[in-house]
Image (cartoon, grey):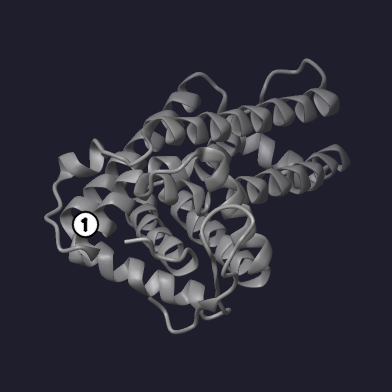
Amino acid sequence: MSTSTTNLSKQPITGPALNRITLESPWKWLAAGWKDLWANASLSLMYGALFAGVAVLLFFGLMSVDMTALILVLAAGFLLLGPMLAVGLYEASWRMETGKPVTFADMLIVRTKSPVQLAYIGLTLAFMFLAWVRIASLLYAIMWGDQPFPPIDDFIPTLLNTVRGAVMLALGTIIGGAIAFAVFAVSVISVPMLAHRNTDFMTAIITSIRAVRENFWPMALWAWLIALLSAFGIAFLFVGLVIVFPLVGHATWHAYRDLVTAND
């Protein structure tokens, strides 16, 4: 793996040994993810198109029932649940790494090493997403009472040009950012780890949190890059996710391999 890593702990308290990384590492992961994306272009882009297609359907579904203000919550939801939805991309990167053939069926139906434990992680992320939806709804209710959600064309100017909107935007950004970073810390390593290793979900979560804590600034940069790329993909009515989602998914696999000492 990357020459930027050095062994951080020979005998960690919980989970496998971790490697020290540098601020160059996230850029190397993106480069490796970009290489995987185009080495497996047809399948990876098809996977990204499937993901983006679901997002577009939900987008137009919300528009059809005049709930376009919830599009912002939908966008946040994809960021929070993305690590689980990218399991097929981790599988593809692992297969390419080990010289195995990659099929779309392999990516859609992943035979993970710890399927039940991975499901627990999925439930954890789903709970955190539902918590965010509830908090967002509560903030709206505090600011606007029982008024129905306005169209997004009216809602965004209200957020930017009124005191109530500015307060809601500030609180939502702070709380949403905290939840998003918590999800990042819990899942950035744990999901690919459970797809690859036979371990329990608590060990995987603790390992993921340790990786973020012990390499805070490089991992903060990685979180920022993921958020920036995701925002770019979402800004084009989610269509940009056709490329962004598989790129980040493949790169996340390389982040896991760079951070966690290999056992194979």
**Residue at image location 22% in from the left, 47% down from the top:** 46
Q: Quadrant of residue 251?
A: bottom left
In the image, farthest residue toward the right: 163
Please report the residue visible at 60 percent of the width from the left and 66 percent of the height from the top: 219
> Where residue 257 sits: x, y (%)?
41, 64
Q: Nearer the viewer, residue 237 or 110?
A: 110
In the displayed structure image, the side of residue 52 where residue 219 appears, left or right: right
Decide: is 43 above or below 65.
below
Question: Which residue extends farthest bottom?
Answer: 3
Determine the residue positioned at 76% across, 43% down. 175
Name the image quarter holding the N terminus.
Answer: bottom left
Residue 59 x %, y %: 45, 33
Horizontal relation, residue 83 to residue 92: left or right: right
For residue 202, which quarter of the picture? top right
Give amino acid for label 1: Arg
Return the residue nearer the eye: 96 or 32.
96
Looking at the image, residue 194 sits to the left or right of residue 106; the answer is right
Residue extending furthest toward the front? 11
Q: Which residue is mark 1?
A: 95
